[in-house]
Image (cartoon, rainbow, N blue to C red):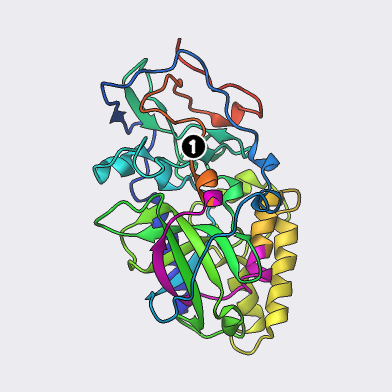
Amino acid sequence: MNKFFLAMLSAAAFSFYGCGDDSSSVETPPESSSSAEAIKTGPTIKDRGNLKSIKNYPVAQYKDIQESGAEGFAAAYWDACLPNCSDPELFKKFGTDPYKDRYGASRSCSVHSYEIPAFTLAKGSTSGTYSAVPNACGYKTPSQGAFTCTDMAPVAVNDTLAYGFAAGYSEKELLCGKCFHIQFTGESYYTETSTSKSIKGKHMIVMVLAQGSDGQSTQVDLMIPGSGNGVYDVLPQMVPNDNTEWGEPYGGFATECYNMLGYESSKPEDIQECIREKCKVAFDGEDNLLEGCLWSADWFYGVSVPKHKIEEVECPQYLVDKYKSTINTEADNNFKYQNDWSIYNPGDFVETVE
């Protein structure tokens, strides 16, 4: 078993740490009041393309941190599971408020890429007790649960700067909603590849959307479509392309391309083209996921577990807007418990308890 596979296996394991199911609950602070009206959700995520919207935001300021940043490395994954920063129970574990602290619980989406609440009234409850929306991963019928929103795929701001989401690791503090500036050193943490030097000096700002406890504090696991479906393999529920081969479960298309073409002996342009072709087949008609997958070839060069320097920074507004829920904005709500989120279509109202 090569070291890259082990790294990806470790990376994929984090996303279920602290995740809730339909039995977890959190008590609402007593001073809050619920809305008497149903709240309309935002537009379907398919209408919020990354490349179009990035042009409406200022470019984040960043500096060279090759000398000052802490040493770390980046793995990658996209299992499509509900990130655990959408689960109020994770906030509760660290004694923080999932409605107010930092940016609160993150957005989550249905199988149709439609934003749904991160938490609703608990099953059988009419007020006061809440539960996380069921995670598609591990749910009895995955298509009825909650997934990662597709517009959380990485996006290039320019040739040397990109934005994205990632998993972070800490046992001592909540990382959800924090942002980190990473600058790639041009080296690989494990096996050097023909593409390793291609991203030397490039910068990326990532926002933590999921948190684990079994990794290094300077490790991030970049959320990149096509980088591995993981053990639950729910991504095909969102992208039911019958003829798609999804690559290695841990490492995805890049690992498959390196295995075919060679880690050190392959030409960078051949690795890029290999990844591009797999992206186009897998994500045909899914613009956000396709853009993010192609980013891994065009901007990221399909690099395998690159080393980086890292420091905490303020979050760019682009990432904040992708992270923040447009639905769960108060400490309580009257959103009715729902065990099948696949029934909602763009423009629908989330059903409420009267």
Q: Depth check: give the residue in front, 65 or 275.
A: 65
Is residue 184 among what the camera can see? yes
Residue 257's spot in the image, x, y percent?
Answer: 65, 75
Side of 141 where 122 appears, left or right = left
Q: Name the image quarter holding the C terminus.
A: top left
Q: Depth check: give the residue in front, 145 or 319.
A: 319
234 is higher (above) or lower (below) than 198? above
Type of amino acid under label 1: Ser
Residue drawn at point x = 32 percent, y = 33 percent: 24
Residue drawn at point x = 41 percent, y = 81 percent: 67
Residue 308's spot in the image, x, y percent?
Answer: 45, 75
Side of 195 where 61 appears, left or right = left
Residue 219's spot in the image, x, y percent?
Answer: 39, 68
127 is higher (above) or lower (below) than 260? above
218 is higher (above) or lower (below) than 164? below
Q: Residue furthest bottom?
A: 265
Is residue 1 among what the camera can see? no
Q: Which residue is mark 1?
A: 325
Residue drawn at point x = 44 percent, y = 76 percent: 65
Q: Which residues are magenta?
A: 295-318
